[in-house]
Amino acid sequence: MSKSKMQQLVEMVAEDQAKTYEYLAKISTFIEQLCEQLADNFGCSLADLSFITSEGDISRAEDSITIKDNGLFDFWLLIKIPVQAFNRNTCGQSFIEKSLAPPSGVVLPMTVKQHENLFMVEVSGKSQKASFEIDPNVDSSWIDLLEYCFVSTKAMLEGGLERRISALGTLRDNPSKRDFGFVWGEKE
């Protein structure tokens, strides 16, 4: 007995769904592995890494990743710096709004795309972007990416209060000059 036309269509869509789930699982597994590698390299817990939305809300990876027209999985990875929270009672609200409080985390904007058995990762640092080709099964392919993430994170924190004060004038003129520092409790 031959398959009905509808059964043929059902099988085509079912096969496509299976391949799509497999593709998404590979991307998700890679992003999890990326987080594990970063946590290990930074000497921190996975709990110190979070995904955030463009509004600054912490969310699940699936809810914070956006897919760009070119097939890139785009997300912001928050690296929490486990220091005691800045005492907001020592300053006025304007001090916080002007981003003068020390950051308690740094955000690394990242994109990931699978190409055959490799993953292309792009990281936006303080002043530039860098791209890396990662084979998740080859430990040495992670080295440059992990070092770039550390150097970029450190660069965003360097200069402290003096840098944040000097950036005030440029922020008014060009909001895109803002670093991706993150202060807990900015949203009340």
Image: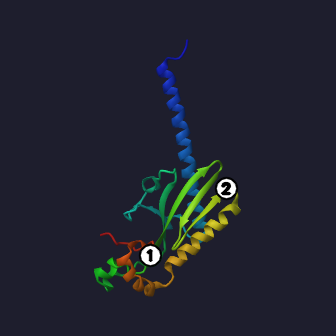
Q: Position of residue 85 (x, y in %)?
A: 40, 78
In the image shown, does 70 or 82 lie closer to the viewer?
A: 70
- Disc 2, SS: loop
Kind of residue at disc 1: Ser
Give the quarter of the figure containing the N terminus. top right
Mark-to-mark CA distance, 1 and 2: 32 Å
Is 48 above or below relative to 165? above
Give the quarter of the figure containing the C terminus. bottom left
Residue in the image at 49% along x and 25% along y: 9
Horizontal arrangement in the rendering, residue 93 relative to residue 146 (left or right): left
Residue in the image at 46% along x and 84% along y: 160
In the image shown, does 136 or 46 lie closer to the viewer?
A: 136
**Based on the displayed image, in which of its 4 quarters is residue 33 positioned?**
bottom right
Task: Give the labeled residue for mark 1.
Answer: 104
Residue 135's disc is: 2
Horizontal arrangement in the rendering, residue 179 relative to residue 135 (left or right): left
Kind of residue at disc 2: Asp
Residue in the image at 29% along x and 83% along y: 92
In the image shown, does 74 or 79 lie closer to the viewer?
A: 74
